[in-house]
Amino acid sequence: MSATRKTIRPLWSVILADLLLTLLILGGWLMTRWISIHRMADAYQQEPLPETTVTAVSSPAPGELPAVAPPTSAPSPAEPANPPESVPETTPETTAEPLPGTEETRTPWQIRFAEQFTPEVETGEGYYTSPNVSVHVSRHTYEGREGTTVFYVADIYVARIECLRSYFAGGNEFPYTTDGMIKMSRGSGAVIAVNGDYCGLSYGGTVLRNGKFLYSDNIGNDVCLLYRDGRMECPALRRFDLADYQGENELWQVWTFGPALLDGNGRALSIEEMNRSSTSRPENPRTALGYYEPGHYCFIVADGRDGDYSAGLWLEEFAEVCALAGCAQAYNMDGGGSSMMVMNDAFVNQPSSGGRRGIPDIILIADLADPADKETEK
C-alpha cells in the first residue's frame, strides 16, 4: 500500500494569493465609490435656465461689452452715458391687481415698487413674486480676454430690509464650520441665495449680520455696509467702530471681502482704483451683491474655470458687468469654487466645484410678511 504524498504550497504563493485577493476586493470598493461620487456630482450639476425663461445676451462686437437688462423700475442712481439696450423680458408680467392693504399698512417700498409685487405667490423657472419680494433671474454672456463667460443676474425687490438676510452654516451659528449651499438654502427658507464672504474662515474683518454685531478685527479691505434704511456703501475701513454707526440700530449687515467694484455712482472702477488689500486679478468664477437704490438689489454670479463652457472674469471685467447691469454700487464676495446661486433648492449656475464645496455663510432673500416672522438671528 503506497502512502499518498501531501503537497505543501510554498509560503510565498500563499502570501501572493492573499495579496491579489485583497487588491481585487479593494479595487471593487474603489470602483463602487467612484461611481457613487460621480453620480452625486451629476446630481449637483444643473443645466442653465432654459431660454424660455431667461435671455442670453448675444456676443458683442470686439471691444464692446454685453448689454445687460437695466432695472425695471425707476432709473438707477447713475445711468451710463450710452445706456445699453434693454434685454427683452421673457418672464411673466406682474399683475396689475393692487396689493392687499391700505397705503397706511403697506411699506414705503411696497408702494414705490408696487408693479414688482403680486398679491399672491407666483413662481416658476427663474422667477418668484409675492407681496413681499420679487426675484427674476436672467442668463447672459460676456466676451472677455480669456473667452466667453456665462453669468446670471437675479433682479431683486424687497418690501422691507429684513427680507435680505444672512445665514451661517451649522444651523445659523456664527461659523468656524461649513455646510453645503443647498442645505443652507433649505435651512434658511431662502427664495434665492448666493454665497457670502467666507466669514470666520478667512482673514478677520467685521461680521455684523441681521442687525447683530458678532466680531471685528482690523483689516485693510473694503467692507460692505447695508443699512437698515436700505442704503449700501462700500468704504475701505482699517478700523471698524460700531459707535460710528449708532450701534446696531443703523446697520443691518456688514461683510468683509471685496473689493468694491463701482464708485457708488454706477462707474466701474479700474484695477488701479480698486483697494489693493482685497484685489484678486486672474479670471475666476465671481459673486457680487449689487445695489440700485433702497429696496432694489441684485445678485450676480459668473461661472468660470471651464473653457468649454465659461472662462471666468478678471476683476475689472466683473466691475464692467456690474456697471452694465445698471448698479450704482456692487461688492465682490468670495469667488472661485464658492461662487454659487441657488433657487428653488437647485443650482442656477454651474459651480466650478460641482456644488460640493462647503461654505460658512450665504446671503439670501426670504419671503417675510413681517419682521416678527423671524427673530434677529445669531
Image (cartoon, helix red, strand yellow):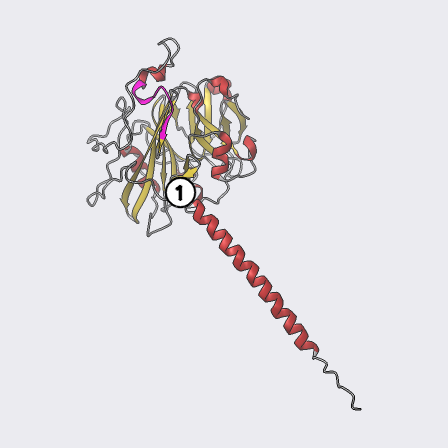
Q: Is residue 86 visible?
A: yes
Residue for badge 1: 280
Rendered view: 183 above or below 242: below
Looking at the image, the residue that sits furthest to the right is: 1
Image coordinates for residue 365, horizontal then vertical, percent: 42, 28
Number of numbered discs present? 1
Frontmost residue, 253 versus 69: 69
- For the point 44% across and 46% down, the residue is 43
Image coordinates for residue 215, horizontal then vertical, percent: 54, 29
The kind of residue tagged 1 is Ser
Q: Residue 72 falls in which quadrant of the image?
A: top left
Rendered view: 76 above or below 282: above
Q: Which residues are magenta?
A: 114-123
Question: In which quadrant will I find the C terminus?
Answer: top right
Judge the density around disc 1: few (<14), some (14-19), many (≥20) Cα neighbours within 10 Å: some
Seen in the image, is 38 located left or right of residue 272?
right
Image coordinates for residue 371, horizontal then vertical, percent: 47, 18
Q: Is residue 354 visible?
A: no
Image coordinates for residue 281, horizontal then vertical, percent: 37, 44
Seen in the image, is 60 located left or right of residue 300?
left
Seen in the image, is 137 located left or right of residue 226?
left
Q: Secondary structure at mark 1?
A: loop
Q: Residue 121 falls in which quadrant of the image?
A: top left
Rendered view: 165 above or below 22: above
- For the point 61% across and 70% down, the residue is 20
Frontmost residue, 105 versus 64: 105
- For the point 33% across and 51% down, the residue is 307
Question: In which quadrant will I find the N terminus?
Answer: bottom right
